[in-house]
């Protein structure tokens, strides 16, 4: 860890999004989990009558404004705000002194924050607080497993493990934790991906000490006070084979002691739970934006920030679900296009979705016109998680009624359980979602506008709250290599910032020599040397943890490489034997046949590869890597040499694999031919400027057309070539 | 790509072996060529050089030379393109963290059996030639007794020689980056083997030292020793000790009292033949000598296996995008 002096990137707003979890363990208090997102600094402190920090620490020893958590370009930073006792982070005291720069430190996944007396030799056992900081996987949650002396806790892929993590790169029986009479011992069971203990690969059994962390690929385990905390994914493909744990009032379960703690994991558990005490939907705290803040008496609990984000405060074992109102039936209208990947655009407010047939754009922060016509047909609402919402007026009845003119409300006294009523906004209706500042007037009958999502357009289908999962986030300031023709270094790339969404098909394009392969080699951690900057995968430093995370990455080379004399089935089987050697024969066979089917090669399964067409051979080559079932694949011109029909077929297959609901893949492809660019979800365009590879554009294909002002994708290159001085189509500054 | 845990080397070897066997058996043309070559060599020996097989030195040595050349040629061509043709596959696999050893081991083991088959075919040339022309087959071996013993010894020599040449081809194909390079180099390697074998020319000085590095030399020595080249009489070397002069052919010039040697007639009908003088050096017919040649060929085999494995390290430096 390094003390941080200045993390201000100076290049637009915080580009790299990150979520983290704080597992807060205070004496005599139940474990609480606080999930935090990047976007604005968060205050950590003790709640009082007058102060409500973002992260509440119920402890006398914690100051009201004890510290600040902030995330800049994916790196979390802890800043002591002049607390009396300071904070211990991994045993090192950070305490700001008057007149000096605030004590700051970067946080990494697994760091332990301890708020206690300044002398740990005499800790305050009643009031000391332990906080475990971890980087979250977007789709998953945290589980907790209490270790018992007589129980051997096995961790692996199959369901006969105590902790079952369903992922292709986790071995059937991967590792185990067991009590040896004196201490808990962690042991790798000859796994494929290895077990990483406190950052280094395990070569033999090791005794676990309090606060130790170990990782299995991209899953993190923390050993704390005889409990194992671990993260896991939540997709259907990765759902644990065992039934969801039943959670009792105090967080105990009757299912092997594994307790879901956070996020989706808890929601899944609640869905399986027979009787859970419904709790009132926690009202999200509204963070008004400075630009939009109406003139009113605002309750200044927290600094206003540009990107408002609801901060959820879950309790132990009972995660309040986002307040969801009944959803009307979707009207078949064109889908709005997704928001452009933020790059140089300041994230003041979510981008308005550009669609084919907008109605009059909804102005922000204005009261609706009197007697507006209902823009959406009344429809049968679907009750969602009714047991967790309090009794509400019938939204269907409300939705069916023509919208009435809503009087502009003057500042009202604080309603218990609701945020401060903002002047200039419609009266907050009890039982309806909280009006988010910075967004159009919240329409009753529509889901809560989520920060970070496109603005809900009236007249369009309900914007489904889709978690924007950025799998890979890159902030590459520079990539240099040794100059083989002279002294010094040669800069190959500069100022490349982009986010790659999970489950998407991304095209990496570029002018000649722009650095496409160089960029790909950085993003897949195969050649990260000479990089200044940061590349994260699920919030974890990809370059620093390349060896551990490499099992999540697959690379498909440009050249088709196989044994022509083998049949398609034999060749894929051979690859499966290499990659999935810990699978049973039956499991491998199922995977191989499923993959061959996905690629449409079942009729040619028993044909020799030498008898296959060029397109089929290319598919075989790709399948040989995809059988490894990684999370993300990098492909170098998979369409090279294919005719247009085969090209389209190829991309269609890749698109299906990326958008697979059960097991989505993230696929980044270097291509030259842009004729099928519409099939891609994201486009990254590089260009060479001043002999250095630079980012010209990153966004959806449709946005690319708007950005370059073109009708055909081929014209992108012309536009770039015409932009000689880089004034138009260059991101990251000259 | 960063390295990491992979399937065990033993399992890799198993998979490589299965794959290579499949590839080999599906290459029917390759198998036919591999087996036809020894058969062609047999035909040459029986038809052209085998008439005086085991009768005299000049009737046996050419057959030995032909069979040794054929063995080296067959072995070399078995594997001259084995590794280079799958260089991109190897590159992809080692980038994924797989080992190079199983590649070499699987090919070496399968080729051993192929070479054994070829050796059997080539060994058959000797008894066939003797039978066709009604000559006496070797009566005993140097280590093993009886005619069968001699045939077994010839087979062992042929096997070691062919296998060593096979692995020499494997080394070549592990070093080169393009298949065309192998096709270009192979004839030169063979010519060098023939020239420095010691069969065509007597090697002395530096030439002799160079010949020690040639498989052909040790092949010739081992098979030549078994075939008795040390003691086989040369058709052209007559033992003059038994020669007689016809008395009537001697005439003395009365004036000069000199014998006109041009008219002297020497009767060599009772003379025997001598063995070649240098044969004793190269074709010493002793068990010790035979075992020495076998030992040297085994050392060659081990060196070539190691060299092939080391040569494959060059694949790691191949450019990923081109595979070469």
Image (spheres, coloured by chain):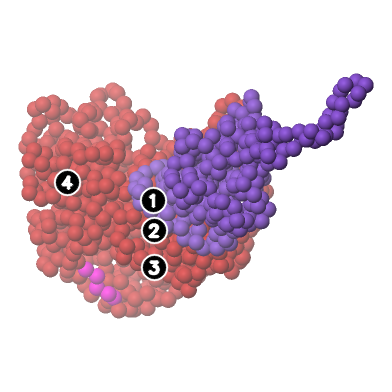
Chain colours: A red, B purple
Residue B94 vs residue A123, the one in the foreground = B94
Secondary structure at numbered mark 4 = strand
Q: Does the magenta stretch include residue B234?
A: no
Q: Is residue A131 above or below residue A238?
A: above
Which chain is mark 1 on?
Answer: B
Q: Is residue A655 left or right of residue B128?
A: left
Secondary structure at numbered mark 1 = helix
> How many other residues sit within 10 Å of disc 4, few (<14), some (14-19) or many (≥20)?
many
The segment highlighted magenta reads A381-385
Which chain is mark 2 on?
Answer: A
Which chain is mark 4 on?
Answer: A
Quadrant location of the N terminus of chain B in the rendered image: top left
Instruction: Give the residue at x 71% y 34%.
Output: B243
Secondary structure at numbered mark 2 = helix
Query: Mark 1 and mark 3: span between their CA atoms?
Result: 24 Å
Query: Mark 2 and mark 1: span between their CA atoms?
Result: 12 Å
Q: Where is residue B201 in the image (x, y as percent from the top left)?
A: 68, 34
Instruction: Give the residue at x 32% y 29%.
Output: A3
Which chain is mark 3 on?
Answer: A
> How many other residues sit within 10 Å of disc 1, few (<14), some (14-19) or many (≥20)?
many
To which residue does mark 4 refer?
A177
> How many other residues sit within 10 Å of disc 2, few (<14), some (14-19) or many (≥20)?
many
Q: Position of residue A57 (x, y in %)?
A: 16, 42
To which residue does mark 2 refer?
A576
Residue A109 vs residue A18, the one in the foreground = A109
To which residue does mark 3 refer?
A594
To which residue does mark 1 refer?
B12
Secondary structure at numbered mark 3 = helix
Q: Do the residues labelled 3 and 4 touch (CB within 8 Å)?
A: no
Query: Mark 4 and mark 2: span between their CA atoms?
Result: 29 Å
């Amino acid at each position: 860890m390094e003390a941080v002096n200045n993390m201000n990137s100076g290049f637009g707003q915080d580009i790299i999004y990150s979520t983290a979890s704080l597992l807060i363990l205070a004496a005599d208090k139940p474990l609480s989990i606080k999930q935090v997102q990047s976007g604005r600094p968060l205050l950590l402190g003790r709640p009082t009558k007058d102060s409500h920090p973002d992260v509440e620490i119920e402890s006398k020893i914690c100051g009201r404004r004890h510290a600040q958590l902030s995330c800049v370009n994916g790196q979390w930073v802890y800043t002591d705000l002049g607390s009396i006792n300071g904070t211990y982070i991994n045993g090192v005291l950070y305490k700001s002194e008057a007149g000096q720069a605030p004590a700051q430190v970067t946080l990494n996944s697994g760091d332990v924050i301890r708020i206690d007396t300044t002398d740990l030799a005499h800790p305050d056992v009643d009031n000391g607080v332990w906080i475990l900081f971890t980087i979250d996987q977007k789709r998953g949650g945290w589980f907790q497993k209490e270790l018992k002396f007589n129980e051997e806790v096995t961790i692996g892929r199959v369901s006969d493990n105590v902790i079952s993590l369903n992922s292709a790169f986790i071995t059937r029986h991967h590792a185990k934790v067991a009590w040896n009479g004196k201490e808990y011992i962690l042991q790798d069971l000859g796994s494929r991906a290895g077990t990483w203990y406190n950052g280094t690969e395990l070569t033999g059994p090791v005794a676990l000490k309090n606060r130790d962390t170990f990782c299995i690929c991209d899953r993190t385990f923390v050993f704390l006070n005889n409990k194992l905390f671990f993260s896991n994914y939540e997709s259907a493909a990765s759902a644990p084979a065992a039934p969801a744990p039943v959670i009792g009032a105090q967080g105990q379960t009757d299912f092997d002691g594994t307790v879901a703690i956070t996020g989706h994991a808890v929601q899944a558990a609640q869905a399986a739970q027979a009787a859970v005490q419904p709790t009132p939907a926690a009202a999200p705290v509204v963070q008004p934006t400075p630009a939009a803040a109406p003139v009113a008496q605002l309750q200044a609990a927290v600094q206003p920030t540009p990107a408002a984000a609801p901060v959820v405060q879950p309790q132990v074992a009972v995660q309040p679900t986002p307040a969801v109102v009944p959803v009307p039936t979707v009207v078949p209208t064109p889908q709005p296009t997704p928001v452009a990947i933020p790059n140089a655009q300041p994230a003041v407010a979510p981008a308005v979705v550009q669609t084919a047939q907008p109605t009059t754009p909804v102005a922000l922060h204005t009261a609706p016109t009197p007697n507006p016509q209902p823009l959406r047909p009344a429809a049968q609402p679907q009750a969602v998680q009714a047991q967790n919402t309090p009794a509400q007026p019938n939204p269907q009845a409300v939705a069916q009624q023509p919208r009435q003119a809503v009087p502009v409300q003057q500042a009202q006294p604080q309603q218990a359980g609701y945020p401060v009523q903002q002047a200039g906004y419609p009266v907050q209706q009890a039982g309806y979602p909280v009006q988010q500042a910075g967004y159009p007037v919240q329409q009753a009958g529509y889901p809560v506008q989520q920060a970070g999502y496109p603005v809900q357009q009236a007249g369009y289908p309900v914007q489904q709250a889709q978690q924007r999962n950025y799998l890979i986030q890159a902030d590459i300031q520079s990539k240099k290599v040794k100059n083989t023709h002279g002294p010094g270094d040669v800069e190959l790339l500069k100022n490349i910032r982009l986010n790659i969404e999970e489950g998407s098909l991304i095209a990496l394009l570029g002018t000649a020599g722009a650095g496409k392969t160089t960029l790909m080699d950085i993003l897949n951690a195969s050649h990260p040397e000479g990089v200044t900057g940061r590349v994260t995968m699920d919030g974890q430093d990809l370059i620093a943890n390349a060896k551990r995370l490499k099992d999540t990455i697959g690379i498909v080379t440009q050249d088709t490489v196989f044994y022509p004399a083998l049949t398609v089935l034999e060749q894929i089987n051979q690859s499966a034997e290499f990659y999935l050697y810990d699978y049973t024969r039956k499991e491998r066979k199922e995977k191989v046949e499923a993959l061959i089917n996905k690629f449409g090669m079942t009729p040619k399964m028993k044909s020799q590869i030498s008898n296959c067409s060029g397109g089929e051979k290319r598919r075989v080559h790709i399948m040989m890597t995809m059988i490894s079932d990684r999370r993300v694949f990098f492909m170098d011109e998979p369409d090279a040499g294919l005719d247009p029909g085969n090209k389209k077929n190829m991309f269609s297959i890749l698109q299906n694999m990326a958008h697979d609901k059960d097991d989505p893949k993230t696929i980044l492809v270097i291509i030259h031919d842009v004729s099928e660019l519409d099939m891609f979800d994201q486009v990254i365009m590089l260009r060479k400027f001043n002999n250095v590879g630079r980012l010209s554009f990153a966004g959806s294909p449709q946005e690319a057309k708007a950005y370059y002002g073109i009708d055909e994708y081929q014209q992108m290159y012309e536009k770039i070539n015409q932009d000689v001085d880089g004034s138009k189509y260059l991101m990251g500054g000259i | 790509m960063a390295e990491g845990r992979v399937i065990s080397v033993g399992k890799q070897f198993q998979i490589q072996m299965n794959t290579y066997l499949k590839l080999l058996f599906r290459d029917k043309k390759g198998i036919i060529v591999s087996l036809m070559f020894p058969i062609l060599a047999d035909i040459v020996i029986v038809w052209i050089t085998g008439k005086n097989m085991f009768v005299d030195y000049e009737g046996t040595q050419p057959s030995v030379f032909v069979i040794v050349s054929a063995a080296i040629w067959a072995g070399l061509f078995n594997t001259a393109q084995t590794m280079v043709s799958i260089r991109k596959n190897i590159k992809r696999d080692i980038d994924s963290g797989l080992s190079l050893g199983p590649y070499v081991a699987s090919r070496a083991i399968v080729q051993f059996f192929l070479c054994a088959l070829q050796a059997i075919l080539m060994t058959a040339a000797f008894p066939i030639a003797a039978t066709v022309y009604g000559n006496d087959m070797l009566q005993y071996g140097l280590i093993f007794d009886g005619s069968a013993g001699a045939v077994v010894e010839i087979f062992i020599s042929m096997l070691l020689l062919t296998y060593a040449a096979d692995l020499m081809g494997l080394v070549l194909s592990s070093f080169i980056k393009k298949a065309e390079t192998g096709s270009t180099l192979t004839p030169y390697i063979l010519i060098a083997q023939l020239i420095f074998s010691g069969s065509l020319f007597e090697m002395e000085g530096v030439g002799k030292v160079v010949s020690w590095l040639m498989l052909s030399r040790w092949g010739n020595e081992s098979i030549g020793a078994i075939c008795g080249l040390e003691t086989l009489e040369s058709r052209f070397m007559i033992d003059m000790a038994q020669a007689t002069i016809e008395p009537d052919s001697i005439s003395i010039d009365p004036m000069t009292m000199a014998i006109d040697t041009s008219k002297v007639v020497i009767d060599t009908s009772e003379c025997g033949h001598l063995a070649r003088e240098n044969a004793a050096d190269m074709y010493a017919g002793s068990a010790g000598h035979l075992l020495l040649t076998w030992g040297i060929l085994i050392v060659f085999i081990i060196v070539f296996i190691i060299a092939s494995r080391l040569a494959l390290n060059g694949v790691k430096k191949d450019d990923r995008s081109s595979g070469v």
